Amino acid sequence: MPSQNYQIVVGVIIAIIIFMLAGFFITAIVAYSNDRKKKFIQEKKLLEAHFNQQLLQSQLEMQEQTFNTISQEIHDNVGQVLSLAKVQLNIMHQHKTFDETLLNDVKESVGKAMTDLRDIAKSLNSERIKLSSLPEITSIELQRISRSGLMQTSLQTDGTEQSLPEQKKLIIFRIIQEALHNILKHSRATNIKVSFSYDPTQLEIKICDNGTGFDKELLSKKDGLGLKNMINRAALIGGSANIESIINHGTFITITCPYD
């Protein structure tokens, strides 16, 4: 009998220990789960904050780049065209004769200045980026470069165009702007080719030039900050940016991004 009671007591103690251990493990699992949940929420908030910061920075950089380009265009293109029209009118005034050919030249100069100003007005409208497709707004950037006479540009689109969320489109456009700016500033290229390929699941953009190229070690140096920004921004929207460059043969940039 005492032996039986002893077994019962031992059994009860073992059961209590098992329940206590089970309770401990359950409590630990719940605590761990809550901790992971909190960390996940914190990480998500940090990622959202980083994304919004990059989005705002991209918007500000686009505005700055646009204003710089417009300032240069007004000075180099519109200003020169209007100066030429003024000279032509002065010649007509000095001769005090009607010269139909010269008058037509003046009309052509003024018309060109008006066209350039209309293009500038369009570029100041931020709604154009929201309402236009990436190939359309990229085409405007390439036309500006072509008008300078320094480089020839071409644009190709393959596949059926797919819509992108506005935030993604802004960041991708800023990456394209950064790439074109680097080409203008550093490459000494005479030709730029941009292509958009709308694949079933993602958009692929290629930007190629025939310039001097650069050593890929530049990506790890301070001078390569703009290139690294392009890579980081592409990753931020779930895509990638691959940069290949060959000395004296040009630079080849491939940007990929899923539609969602």
Image (tube, rainbow, N blue to C red):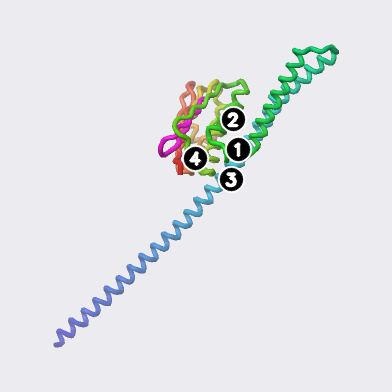
Q: SS for tag 1?
A: helix
* Proximity of marks 3 and 2: CB atoms separated by less than 8 Å: no
* Proximity of marks 2 and 1: CB atoms separated by less than 8 Å: yes
The dominant secondary structure in magenta is strand
Residue 56 marker: 3
* Proximity of marks 2 and 4: CB atoms separated by less than 8 Å: no
Tag 2 residue: 140
- Residue 199 coordinates in the image, percent (x, y): 42, 35
- Residue 60 coordinates in the image, percent (x, y): 61, 41
| Residue stretch in magenta | 192-206
- Residue 168 coordinates in the image, percent (x, y): 51, 42
User: Any magenta on residue 202?
Assistant: yes
* Proximity of marks 1 and 4: CB atoms separated by less than 8 Å: no
The CA span between labels 3 and 2 is 22 Å
Q: Nearer the viewer, mark 3 or mark 2?
A: 2
Q: SS for tag 2?
A: helix
Number of residues whose C-alpha sits closer than 10 Å to that of mark 3, classed few (under 14), some (14–19) or many (20 or more): some
Q: Nearer the viewer, mark 2 or mark 4?
A: 4
The CA span between labels 1 and 3 is 17 Å
Tag 4 residue: 163
Q: Nearer the viewer, mark 3 or mark 4?
A: 4
Number of residues whose C-alpha sits closer than 10 Å to that of mark 4, classed few (under 14), some (14–19) or many (20 or more): few
Q: SS for tag 4?
A: loop
| Left or right of 172, for residue 202 | left
